Amino acid sequence: MKIESITFHHLKMPLVSPFETSFGRDIDRECILITIHSEGMIGHGECVASRDPGYNYETTGTAMHILKDFIAPLILGKDVKDAMDFQARVSGIRGHHLAKAGMEMALWDLLGKRTGKSLRELLGGVREKVEVGVSIGIQSSAQGLVRSAADYIKQGYARVKIKIKPGRDVEDASAVRKEFPNLRLQVDANSAYSLDDAKILKPLDKLNLLLIEQPLFEDDIWDHHKLQDQFETPICLDESIFSPRHARYAIEMKACRTINIKAGRLGGLSQGVMVHDICREVSMPVWCGGMLETGVGRASNLAIASLPNFILPADISASDRYYVRDITNESFTLNSDSTIDVPNGVGLGVTINEDALKEFTLAVVLIS
Ligand code: OSB
Ligand code: MG
């Protein structure tokens, strides 16, 4: 696939409701839409870096810099065969996985369109629909959180994840558990605690949670092992796993019992599939995480989440949970069995609504 030009749209889209985590509160979401032009066809990818370096060190600003000044020159005018060829070309760039993954997604979309295959087929997905849940941000009170959870459950979400942070953990989770004794419930701390806080978190172990996601620091795989040792509830790693090697470390150290796979954090869908395969080998179930994606990234998440070892429900919600207006013409809706259909069109299976794109674009960069 000869890469002729690449367009980057830096977007800012209003969220339907504020999203608060242990690292901050957002009322809108920034990301970068990447469009590759090749021999009369286009491929789209979404770089999931946000405005602030809160989830990890990347931002829309650093990602734009790495994409246009380092990644684009390595593929522009070149014949890029596939994702592994792309990974080889960008292997000299340290880190910046969110930037790399956005470009890899666009190449997959292009590859699908060239070969007449859906991304699901290309990746080896085996399901036509994916079981999903909803990720609820920190609310103003535990009662507010219970109301929010009730609302999503009414909409049909059969699994709920709540964000926690020091001071807003056990009480919040207990309130939801008390109201919904049989709900499939899990919590996500986004690296807000240290091993010394294990005592504070211990009551969570009695709430019959599906998992506790990323309680400790990003670079603390070993301390997660020590924590897992003290907990019955499975520990899930998100931020800590940014390569297939990290997945192996976590497995060997017994630092977790499940991994949240995000193609962005891992540097590309190809790397996500590798982590899936590594975990499958040792019978560790995985699940697909989310980064409040637009329809573009959501299509990508659904495709990878259709692989066989994605066992736990995904953080992929319906379009209307995130945005009043999305940038894709297609929108994703929740089925009555708490699933969302995997797109089956070629590539990602989505098209861009140019008017919406225009409405949300802060800046455009064209490289040819
Ligand atoms: O840690 O899983 C996370 C959103 C932004 C950054 C980090 C995370 C999240 C979510 C949202 O939990 C999941 C979704 O996209 O629905
Ligand atoms: Mg997480």
Image: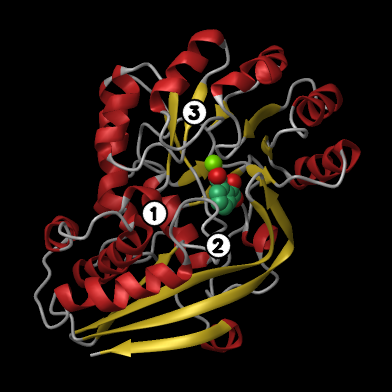
92 to 2, vertically: above or below: above
Name the residue nearer the viewer: 343 or 314: 314
Residue behind mark 3:
236
Q: Which mark is residue 168?
A: none
Circles 3 and 2 in contact, beta carbons < 8 Å: no
Name the residue nearer the viewer: 229 or 368: 229
Residue behind mark 2:
52
Q: Is residue 257 visible?
A: no
| Residue lying at the far front of the rendered structure | 196
Residue 119 occupies quadrant: bottom left
Could you tell me residue 333's position as x and y percent? 62, 57
Residue behind mark 1:
264
Q: Amino acid at mark 1?
A: Gly
Which mark lies nearer to you, 3 or 2? 2
Disc 3 or 2, which lies upstream in sequence?
2
Which residue is pictured at 56% across the width and 30% down the height? 215
353 to 159, vertically: above or below: below
Could you tell me residue 16's position as x and y percent? 73, 64
Q: Quadrant of the N terminus?
A: bottom left
Which residue is pictured at 77% across the width and 33% down the height? 167
Element type at mark 1: helix
Residue 36 occupies quadrant: bottom left
Which residue is pictured at 29% across the width and 54% down the height? 95
Q: CA distance from mark 1 to mark 2?
A: 16 Å
Could you tell me residue 170's position as x and y percent? 76, 24
